[in-house]
Amino acid sequence: MFITFEGPDGSGKSTQISRLAERLRAAGYAVLQTREPGGTTIGEQIRHVLHDLDNTAMQPRAELLLYSAARAQLVGEVIRPHLNRGGLVLSDRFYDSTLAYQGYGHGLELDTLRHIQAFATGGLTPDLTLLFDIDAETGLSRRKVGDGEWNRLDAYALEFHNRVRDGYLALSEAEPKRWVRLDAAQSVETLAARVWDAVALRLSTVA
Protein backbone atom coordinates (compact mmCIF):
# COMPACT_ATOMS: atom_id res chain seq x y z
CA MET A 1 0.00 0.00 0.00
CA PHE A 2 1.15 3.52 -0.87
CA ILE A 3 0.01 6.29 1.50
CA THR A 4 0.80 9.96 0.94
CA PHE A 5 0.66 12.90 3.33
CA GLU A 6 -0.38 16.23 1.84
CA GLY A 7 -1.23 19.69 3.07
CA PRO A 8 -0.08 23.28 3.37
CA ASP A 9 3.22 24.12 5.01
CA GLY A 10 3.03 24.00 8.80
CA SER A 11 0.20 21.47 8.89
CA GLY A 12 2.15 18.91 10.93
CA LYS A 13 2.63 16.27 8.24
CA SER A 14 6.22 15.49 9.13
CA THR A 15 5.41 14.84 12.78
CA GLN A 16 2.45 12.64 11.95
CA ILE A 17 4.16 10.56 9.27
CA SER A 18 6.94 9.61 11.71
CA ARG A 19 4.41 8.65 14.37
CA LEU A 20 2.44 6.53 11.93
CA ALA A 21 5.57 4.80 10.62
CA GLU A 22 6.60 3.86 14.14
CA ARG A 23 3.17 2.48 14.97
CA LEU A 24 2.92 0.49 11.74
CA ARG A 25 6.37 -1.02 12.25
CA ALA A 26 5.35 -2.04 15.77
CA ALA A 27 2.34 -3.77 14.19
CA GLY A 28 4.65 -5.78 11.93
CA TYR A 29 4.47 -3.87 8.64
CA ALA A 30 7.54 -3.39 6.42
CA VAL A 31 7.37 0.40 6.27
CA LEU A 32 9.39 2.71 4.04
CA GLN A 33 9.14 6.36 5.09
CA THR A 34 10.27 8.97 2.58
CA ARG A 35 9.77 12.60 1.60
CA GLU A 36 9.57 14.92 -1.38
CA PRO A 37 11.61 16.37 -2.75
CA GLY A 38 14.31 14.03 -1.56
CA GLY A 39 14.44 10.43 -0.47
CA THR A 40 17.42 9.68 -2.74
CA THR A 41 20.90 11.16 -3.11
CA ILE A 42 19.87 12.85 -6.35
CA GLY A 43 16.55 13.99 -4.92
CA GLU A 44 18.21 15.60 -1.90
CA GLN A 45 20.48 17.61 -4.20
CA ILE A 46 17.45 18.81 -6.14
CA ARG A 47 15.73 19.65 -2.85
CA HIS A 48 18.58 21.99 -1.94
CA VAL A 49 18.24 23.86 -5.24
CA LEU A 50 14.45 24.11 -4.95
CA HIS A 51 14.39 25.30 -1.35
CA ASP A 52 17.40 27.62 -1.37
CA LEU A 53 16.20 31.11 -0.42
CA ASP A 54 18.79 32.60 -2.80
CA ASN A 55 17.05 31.09 -5.83
CA THR A 56 14.33 33.75 -6.07
CA ALA A 57 14.70 33.97 -9.86
CA MET A 58 13.40 30.40 -10.34
CA GLN A 59 10.57 30.25 -12.85
CA PRO A 60 7.39 28.25 -12.05
CA ARG A 61 8.01 25.90 -15.00
CA ALA A 62 11.57 25.25 -13.85
CA GLU A 63 10.25 24.64 -10.33
CA LEU A 64 7.73 22.15 -11.70
CA LEU A 65 10.32 20.23 -13.70
CA LEU A 66 12.79 20.03 -10.83
CA TYR A 67 10.15 18.63 -8.48
CA SER A 68 9.13 16.16 -11.19
CA ALA A 69 12.74 15.04 -11.73
CA ALA A 70 13.21 14.37 -8.02
CA ARG A 71 9.91 12.48 -8.00
CA ALA A 72 10.87 10.30 -10.98
CA GLN A 73 14.10 9.33 -9.23
CA LEU A 74 12.30 8.55 -5.96
CA VAL A 75 9.67 6.37 -7.62
CA GLY A 76 12.14 4.40 -9.71
CA GLU A 77 14.87 4.00 -7.11
CA VAL A 78 12.92 3.63 -3.88
CA ILE A 79 9.12 3.55 -3.93
CA ARG A 80 8.35 0.98 -6.64
CA PRO A 81 11.00 -1.51 -5.48
CA HIS A 82 9.61 -1.42 -1.93
CA LEU A 83 6.02 -1.82 -3.13
CA ASN A 84 7.08 -4.69 -5.39
CA ARG A 85 8.53 -6.44 -2.34
CA GLY A 86 5.13 -6.21 -0.65
CA GLY A 87 6.04 -3.30 1.63
CA LEU A 88 4.08 -0.27 2.74
CA VAL A 89 5.27 3.19 1.66
CA LEU A 90 4.57 6.46 3.48
CA SER A 91 5.56 9.60 1.58
CA ASP A 92 5.59 13.16 2.89
CA ARG A 93 4.19 14.73 -0.32
CA PHE A 94 3.76 13.30 -3.82
CA TYR A 95 2.35 14.58 -7.11
CA ASP A 96 -0.68 16.23 -5.50
CA SER A 97 1.76 18.79 -4.10
CA THR A 98 2.64 19.75 -7.67
CA LEU A 99 -1.02 20.18 -8.57
CA ALA A 100 -1.60 22.30 -5.47
CA TYR A 101 1.57 24.44 -5.52
CA GLN A 102 2.54 24.74 -9.17
CA GLY A 103 -1.03 24.32 -10.46
CA TYR A 104 -3.33 26.21 -8.11
CA GLY A 105 -0.55 28.29 -6.52
CA HIS A 106 1.30 29.43 -9.65
CA GLY A 107 -1.57 28.97 -12.09
CA LEU A 108 0.10 26.44 -14.41
CA GLU A 109 -2.33 24.42 -16.51
CA LEU A 110 -3.58 21.42 -14.52
CA ASP A 111 -4.03 18.98 -17.39
CA THR A 112 -0.47 19.63 -18.53
CA LEU A 113 0.78 19.03 -15.00
CA ARG A 114 -1.13 15.75 -14.80
CA HIS A 115 0.51 14.50 -18.01
CA ILE A 116 3.96 15.41 -16.70
CA GLN A 117 3.27 13.69 -13.39
CA ALA A 118 2.01 10.54 -15.09
CA PHE A 119 5.29 10.41 -17.01
CA ALA A 120 7.44 11.14 -13.96
CA THR A 121 5.76 8.49 -11.80
CA GLY A 122 5.12 5.88 -14.47
CA GLY A 123 1.43 6.16 -13.59
CA LEU A 124 1.87 5.37 -9.89
CA THR A 125 -1.10 6.59 -7.82
CA PRO A 126 -1.41 6.58 -4.01
CA ASP A 127 -3.87 4.16 -2.45
CA LEU A 128 -4.67 6.66 0.29
CA THR A 129 -3.92 10.36 0.64
CA LEU A 130 -4.26 12.15 3.98
CA LEU A 131 -4.90 15.88 3.73
CA PHE A 132 -3.73 17.86 6.75
CA ASP A 133 -5.91 20.91 6.38
CA ILE A 134 -5.08 24.18 8.08
CA ASP A 135 -5.51 27.81 7.11
CA ALA A 136 -2.46 29.25 5.40
CA GLU A 137 -1.75 32.00 7.92
CA THR A 138 -1.73 29.59 10.87
CA GLY A 139 0.42 27.11 8.99
CA LEU A 140 3.03 29.71 8.08
CA SER A 141 3.08 31.02 11.65
CA ARG A 142 3.86 27.49 12.83
CA ARG A 143 6.71 27.24 10.31
CA LYS A 144 8.28 30.46 11.52
CA VAL A 145 8.42 29.35 15.16
CA GLY A 146 9.13 25.66 14.54
CA ASP A 147 12.40 23.80 14.13
CA GLY A 148 11.94 22.98 10.45
CA GLU A 149 13.51 24.76 7.50
CA TRP A 150 12.06 28.05 6.22
CA ASN A 151 12.45 27.60 2.48
CA ARG A 152 11.96 29.49 -0.77
CA LEU A 153 8.34 28.39 -1.17
CA ASP A 154 7.47 29.29 2.42
CA ALA A 155 8.57 32.82 1.58
CA TYR A 156 5.93 33.25 -1.14
CA ALA A 157 3.11 35.72 -0.40
CA LEU A 158 0.16 34.67 1.77
CA GLU A 159 -2.13 34.88 -1.28
CA PHE A 160 -0.09 32.11 -2.92
CA HIS A 161 -0.50 29.86 0.10
CA ASN A 162 -4.22 30.57 0.23
CA ARG A 163 -4.50 29.38 -3.38
CA VAL A 164 -2.52 26.25 -2.48
CA ARG A 165 -4.93 25.43 0.33
CA ASP A 166 -7.92 26.01 -1.97
CA GLY A 167 -6.26 23.67 -4.44
CA TYR A 168 -5.88 20.93 -1.88
CA LEU A 169 -9.53 21.22 -0.92
CA ALA A 170 -10.58 21.01 -4.58
CA LEU A 171 -8.36 17.97 -5.19
CA SER A 172 -9.71 16.13 -2.16
CA GLU A 173 -13.31 16.86 -3.12
CA ALA A 174 -12.70 15.56 -6.65
CA GLU A 175 -11.43 12.15 -5.41
CA PRO A 176 -13.22 11.43 -2.12
CA LYS A 177 -12.44 7.70 -2.27
CA ARG A 178 -8.68 8.34 -2.17
CA TRP A 179 -8.52 11.36 0.12
CA VAL A 180 -9.23 11.71 3.84
CA ARG A 181 -9.33 15.30 5.09
CA LEU A 182 -8.08 15.88 8.64
CA ASP A 183 -8.30 19.01 10.78
CA ALA A 184 -4.62 19.84 11.35
CA ALA A 185 -5.48 22.43 14.01
CA GLN A 186 -6.16 19.61 16.48
CA SER A 187 -3.61 18.58 19.10
CA VAL A 188 -0.76 16.31 18.00
CA GLU A 189 -2.19 13.38 19.96
CA THR A 190 -5.73 13.83 18.68
CA LEU A 191 -4.54 14.16 15.11
CA ALA A 192 -2.37 11.04 15.46
CA ALA A 193 -5.44 9.10 16.56
CA ARG A 194 -7.40 10.33 13.54
CA VAL A 195 -4.53 9.35 11.24
CA TRP A 196 -4.40 5.86 12.70
CA ASP A 197 -8.17 5.44 12.37
CA ALA A 198 -8.06 6.39 8.69
CA VAL A 199 -5.11 4.15 7.89
CA ALA A 200 -6.34 1.17 9.92
CA LEU A 201 -9.68 1.34 8.14
CA ARG A 202 -8.02 1.31 4.72
CA LEU A 203 -5.66 -1.50 5.68
CA SER A 204 -8.57 -3.59 6.88
CA THR A 205 -10.12 -3.48 3.42
CA VAL A 206 -7.05 -5.07 1.80
CA ALA A 207 -6.13 -7.52 4.54
Image: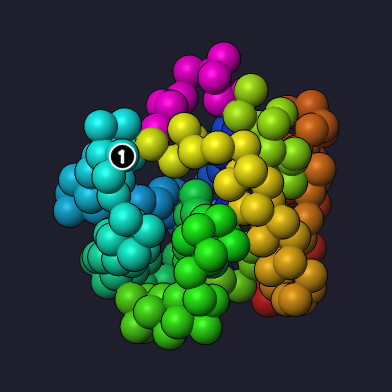
Identify the residue at horizontal 58%, vertical 47% (top origin): 160
- 104 in magenta: no
Which x, y percent locates residue 195? 73, 47
Nearer to me, 35 or 100: 100
Nearer to me, 15 or 170: 170
* Rendered view: 54 above or below 109: above
Please name the residue that numbered disc 1 is placed on: 56
Nearer to me, 136 or 2: 136
User: From the viewer's perspective, is 207 left or right of 55?
Assistant: right
What amino acid type is highlighted by mark number 1?
Thr
- 145 in magenta: yes
Q: Is residue 204 visible?
A: no
Per the picture, the main secondary structure of the magenta-coloured stretch is loop
Which x, y percent locates residue 155? 47, 32
The scheme the figure's colours follow is rainbow
Identify the residue at horizontal 63%, vertical 23% (top origin): 142
Q: Quadrant of the C terminus?
A: bottom right
* Rendered view: 111 above or below 89: below
Dot 1 falls on a residue whose secondary structure is loop
Q: Quadrant of the N terminus?
A: bottom right
